[in-house]
Image (tube, rainbow, N blue to C red):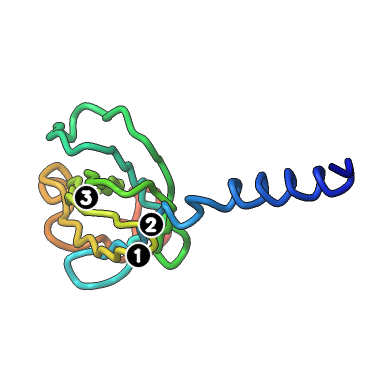
Amino acid sequence: MNRGILLVIISCLLGGLSTYGADAVGTLKGVVKDPTGAIVAKTAIFVRRNPTKFTPETLPRQDVAIWTDRGARFVTQLQPALYDVCAYSAAFSPNCQTVKVSSGQVQEIEFHLQLSEAFTREYGDEFPTSPEPSAGSKDK
């Protein structure tokens, strides 16, 4: 057999193998919001395959760790499976959901974070809108 033809056949076979399974991932995307529906940017998202319940106090070993963007959105590609997906943000209690990611599909989730107990003890149910004037302030 001609050596050139053999190289073409081998490269076609290898090229086909490299694209085989390219659709074997799914997309997980979502958004994080507070109790009022406002976005919560810079939220840490931890994704762990094979759901196991873990406590918010212990940072889980994760398959994926990402941050939300300024619009509180995140997106990642994952192998098809069940995953625990948890959102962590300052002043809020962690929130976890179990989601199924399927091959070639987009799975969308939305987190609604609640203010943490420590935050509400300190500030109440609302975010402070302006700092308290200090004792040395010239405001009267």
Q: Quadrant of the C terminus?
A: bottom left
Say whether marks 2 and 1 touch (CB < 8 Å).
yes
Which of disc 1 and disc 2 is earlier in sequence?
Answer: 2
Left-right relation of 70 to 97: right
Circle 1 residue: 105
Check disc 3 and report its element: helix, strand or loop.
Answer: loop
Horizontal side, residue 64 vs residue 8: left or right: left
Q: Residue at x 41, y 58 (%)?
A: 74
Relative to 129, does residue 103 appear above or below in the rendering?
Answer: above
Nearest the viewer among 112 and 127 is 112
Q: Please name which of the two marks, 3 or 1, marks the residue nearer to the observer.
A: 1
The amino acid type found where label 1 is placed reads: Gln
Q: Residues within 10 Å of mark 2 (few under 14, many from 20)?
A: many
Q: Quadrant of residue 52?
A: top left
Q: Position of residue 60 (x, y in %)?
A: 27, 30
Q: Is residue 140 visible?
A: no
Q: Position of residue 46 (x, y in %)?
A: 32, 42
Q: Label 3 amino acid?
A: Phe
Q: Are marks 3 and 1 in contact (CB under 8 Å)?
A: no
- Compared across the picture, whether 109 is left or right of 24 comes to left
Name, please, the residue furthest toward the front: 1
The amino acid sitting under disc 2 is Gly
Residue that appears at 37% across and 35% down: 63
Q: Quadrant of residue 114?
A: bottom left
Label annotation for residue 92: 3
> How far apart are the alpha carbons under marks 2 and 3?
29 Å
For label 2, the residue is 26
Along the line of sight, which residue is nearer the eye, 82 or 56?
82
Question: How far is the residue under mark 3 from the one under mark 1?
Answer: 30 Å
**Residue in the foreground of this view, choosing between 49 and 29:** 49
